Image (tube, grey):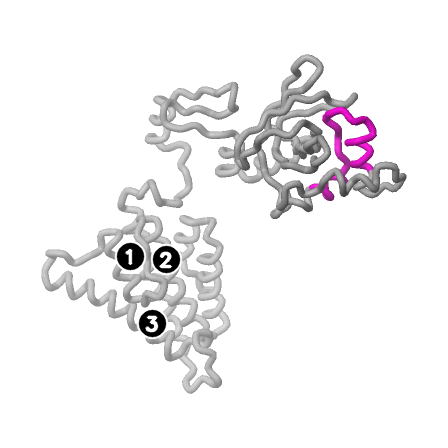
């Protein structure tokens, strides 16, 4: 089977570009099967390579640019241009652009996938298919080689990090790595602060998933407390006594229920911190308003106060009002689902 070695080098350069790998395989398969799909795939290969190089050079390509325009832009981005080199080089440069235009026209006339033709008026010979395939490979070889000859644009390149490069070793030597015990962030000199989750998510997705699977299940609590001023998005601090066996920790989900005759579900939020303060627990959370205020009121729960049913309205009523004092109580999954339904986007 004929293989496009230069195009395969591009796939190796951008291993996460699954579309590019699929296009190369389509060209090779089309040649093997003697199919005119080679023409479509060959043009796509040039376009995909040009767009990837332009992206790595921080240059935005027009969405509907022709293959000739893309080739011109990509060649310019990697230093392949005719500026001041004389007529001979200009003609050679223009020859590449003419070849790109020819590839586009071949696709327009003979591509079987591009316009949904009813019936092919002319079926290409294998030698003509080979012209399109090798032409596309020549573009890829030229552009990739010139691209690698130039220093990468470090703000945009997607080339794989080279751990054993001298440059990276020198950078490692001058950066002092510390950890912020309060935030858990990794501090890299005076240049960056990164959370462990951020590092794993960006650089090792499998390790991120492993860490996620190690997480203990989050608890959910309801805090019945006196009404207080609440600004959505701001931190709110409440101090109440936790019922026996109830533990509140950072990351737990807390629903806050205002006590009193006109009380009800006021807001919810993730616990930022929870500290024991005498007989009570000081809970800090970032407030999030329900759809209506209150979303569920004392009046709505009152009919269920003496009910024996397992429905969440009844169990919540028992927890909140069987003993009138303010408190922090644990919530069941059914109660969490019931309360969460009163927030616009769920939780």
Label 1: which secondary element: helix
Position of residue 43 measured from the top left corner of the image (x, y, whole percent):
38, 67
Query: Where does the magenta region start and end?
Result: 315-339
Q: Which residue is mark 1?
A: 74
Describe residue 168's horizontal placement relative to residue 317 as left or right. Answer: left
Label 2: which secondary element: helix
Can the viewer see residue 214? no
Q: Which comes before the other along the chain, label 1 or label 3? A: 1
- In front: 188, or 296? 296
Q: Residue at x 61, y 34 (%)?
A: 269
Q: Which residue is mark 3?
A: 104
Task: For the residues labelled 1 and 2, say whether their Cβ atoms are less than 8 Å apart.
Answer: yes
Q: Residue at x 78, y 40 (%)?
A: 301
Can the viewer see residue 321? yes
Position of residue 4 measured from the top left corner of the image (x, y, whole percent):
41, 60
Q: Is residue 119 above or below residue 325?
A: below
């Amino acid at each position: 089977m004929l293989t496009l070695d230069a195009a395969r080098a591009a796939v190796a350069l951008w291993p996460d570009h699954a579309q590019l790998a699929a296009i190369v395989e389509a060209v090779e398969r089309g040649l093997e099967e003697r199919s005119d799909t080679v023409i479509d795939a060959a043009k796509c290969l040039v376009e995909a390579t040009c767009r990837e190089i332009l992206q790595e050079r921080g240059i935005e390509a027009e969405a509907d640019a022709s293959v000739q325009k893309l080739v011109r832009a990509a060649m310019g981005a990697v230093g392949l241009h005719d500026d001041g080199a004389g007529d001979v080089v200009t003609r050679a440069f223009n020859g590449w652009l003419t070849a790109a235009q020819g590839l586009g026209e071949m696709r327009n006339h003979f591509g079987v996938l591009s316009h949904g033709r009813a019936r092919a008026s002319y079926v290409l010979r294998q030698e003509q298919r080979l012209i399109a395939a090798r032409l596309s490979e020549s573009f890829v070889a030229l552009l990739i080689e010139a691209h690698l000859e130039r220093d990468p644009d470090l703000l945009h390149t997607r080339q794989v990090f080279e751990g054993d490069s001298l440059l990276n070793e020198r950078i490692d030597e001058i950066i002092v790595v510390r950890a912020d015990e309060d935030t858990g962030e990794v501090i890299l000199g005076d240049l960056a602060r990164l959370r462990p989750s951020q590092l794993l998510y960006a650089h090792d997705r499998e390790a991120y998933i492993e860490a996620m699977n190690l997480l203990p299940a989050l608890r959910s609590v309801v805090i019945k407390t006196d009404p207080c001023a609440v600004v959505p998005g701001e931190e709110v601090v409440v101090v109440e006594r936790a019922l026996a066996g109830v533990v509140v920790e950072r990351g737990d989900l807390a629903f806050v229920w205002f006590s009193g005759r006109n009380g009800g579900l006021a807001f919810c939020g993730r616990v930022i911190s929870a500290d024991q303060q005498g007989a009570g627990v000081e809970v800090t959370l970032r407030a999030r308003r329900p759809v209506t205020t209150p979303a569920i009121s004392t009046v709505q729960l009152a009919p269920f106060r003496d009910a024996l049913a397992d429905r969440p309205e009844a169990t919540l009523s028992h927890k909140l009002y069987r003993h009138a004092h303010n408190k922090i109580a644990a919530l069941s999954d059914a109660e969490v689902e019931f309360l969460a339904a009163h927030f616009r986007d769920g939780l």
